[in-house]
Image: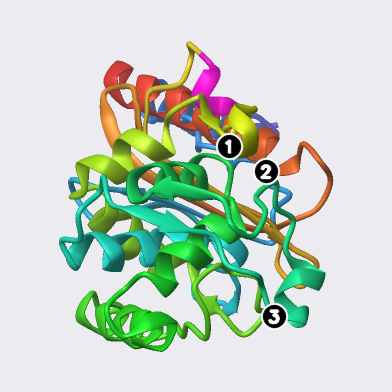
Amino acid sequence: MVRNWMMNNKLCLLMLFGYALTSHAVYAETEHNHFKPAKVSQPHVRSHIALILDEQTQQPLFNKNADRIAPIASITKLMTAMVVLDAMLPMDEPVSVAADDPAVRKRARSRLSAGMTFTRSELLKMALIASENRAMLALARSYPGGTEAVVAAMNAKALELGMQNTVFYETTGLSRDNVSTANDLAKMVAAARNYPLIQEYSTTASLSVDGLGGRALRFSNTNPLVRSASWDIGLSKTGYINEAGLCLVMAANINERPVIIVLLNSWGKRTRVGDANRLRKWMENTYAREHRT
């Protein structure tokens, strides 16, 4: 009987001890979860290559294949624009559009015809707003030393900016051999931010110029987000060829934080814009959570 009494009491003590341990563990877990914020989910990005870079800290906030080398299409035009502006050529000087060689004519979509003449400023606006290929080709031809000199200057500037995985073969982005990475392009966008004309022209919603016979030619920005009141965009450029897919780079302020967004190899008409909106929403939520915790 005494033995049974001792066994029963020992069992009760063990049960009480186990309950205390469990209660302490539950309390500890609850207390821990109360103070530790939930793990931040990653944005769903459909572009094959994507990057958000914090311009102040130079740290990536989101990275998807940012070191993968890929064709960059008309994102090329940002580098061409910088090199043209570096030459300090008169922006009000008339420049004529020349006939393209057959290979360029086959790939280039353009509303400009050979013989049209515009100021260098108008051609740069067309190239950055509407990604006008013949406008950029005309600018390259008017560069001291011609197109070959422009391409050489573009590659030299890429090395100067630390773009080690970038090569340019021509000035428009029509060639699939113009390649780079998201990390390199972030450096290029950051450098382009130092050119007020590139900032202004690349974010202009539309442009109207006089064509042949005084007929007005109207161009719209290829990035619809520059027309959105919900975005604060300081620089923008789109691109597309079959080998590169749809591309988009932007410098923008999100929650008063300056960032660079790079999206490459997107497929689907609205994918790159949709990805940009998803990244902005994700950043807004994440940044707000940081302030709450």
Mark 2 surroundings within 10 Å by alpha-carbon count, few (fewer than 14), some (14 through 19), many (20 or more): many
Ranked by sequence position, the earlier of labels 1 and 3 is 3
Q: Which mark is residue 101?
A: 3
Q: Is residue 26 left or right of residue 185?
A: right
Tell me which segment is drawn in magenta.
224-228
Residue 145 in sight from this viewpoint: yes
Name the foreground residue: 35 vs 38. Answer: 38
Question: Does residue 206 lie above or below 63 as drawn?
Answer: above
Ranked by sequence position, the earlier of labels 3 and 2 is 3
Badge 2 vs badge 1, beta-carbon distance below 8 Å: yes
Q: Could you tell me the amino acid type at mark 1?
A: Ala
Separation of residues labelled 2 and 1 (CA atoms): 6 Å
Q: Could you tell me the amino acid type at mark 3?
A: Asp
Quadrant of the rendered image containing residue 28: top left
Name the foreground residue: 4 vs 22. Answer: 22
Q: Which mark is residue 276?
A: 1
Residue at 31%, 39% (x, y): give it.
199
Residue at 54%, 60% (x, y): give it.
97
